[in-house]
Image (cartoon, grey):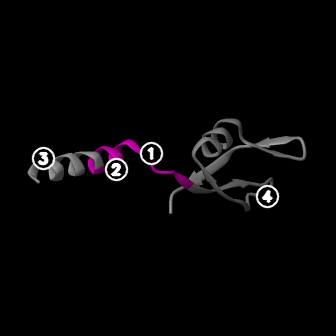
Amino acid sequence: MKALFITTLSFCLISLFSCKKSECHDCHYDDAAGAEVELGEYCDDELEAIEASGYNDNGTIRTVHCHGH
């Protein structure tokens, strides 16, 4: 019984820490007048991509700012 408990506990801990939690942030850019334009929520790879590449606003690449909840 003790071995089963230890095995089950080990499996649960490994499962808990091996799964990557999704990281999501709300993002926006500042338009030419300085007003914030909300882009919505981006997660994981999409979050990294929009922060690195910016947002294409009709041919103008805008710097994107993202912040957590």
Instruction: Kindly state the secondary structure of the residue where label 2 is placed.
Output: helix
Query: Gap between marks 3 and 1, in whole Å?
Result: 28 Å
- The amino acid marked with disc number 3 is Ala
Query: Gap between marks 4 and 3, in whole Å?
Result: 66 Å
- The amino acid marked with disc number 1 is Lys
Single out the mark in the foreground, 4 or 2.
Answer: 2
Residue at label 1? 20
Query: Gap between marks 2 and 3, in whole Å?
Result: 20 Å
- The amino acid marked with disc number 4 is Ala
Residue 6 versus residue 41 in the image, above or below: above
Asked whether residue 55 is drawn in magenta, I would say no
Q: Earlier in the sequence, mark 2 or mark 3?
A: 3
- Badge 2 crowding class, 10 Å Cα cut-off, few under 14, some 14 to 19, many 20 or more, is few
Asked whether disc 4 touches disc 2, contact meaning CB atoms under 8 Å apart, the reply is no
Question: Residue 12 location, x and y as percent?
Answer: 29, 51
Residue at label 2? 16
Q: What residue appears at the point 85 percent right and 42 percent down from the top-left corner?
A: 60
Residue at label 4? 33
**Region in magenta:** 12-24
Query: Gap between marks 1 and 2, in whole Å?
Result: 9 Å
Dividing the picture into quadrants, the one containing residue 62 is top right
Q: Earlier in the sequence, mark 4 or mark 2?
A: 2
- Badge 3 crowding class, 10 Å Cα cut-off, few under 14, some 14 to 19, many 20 or more, is few
Asked whether disc 4 touches disc 3, contact meaning CB atoms under 8 Å apart, the reply is no
Residue at label 3? 3
Residue 45 versus residue 67 in the image, above or below: above
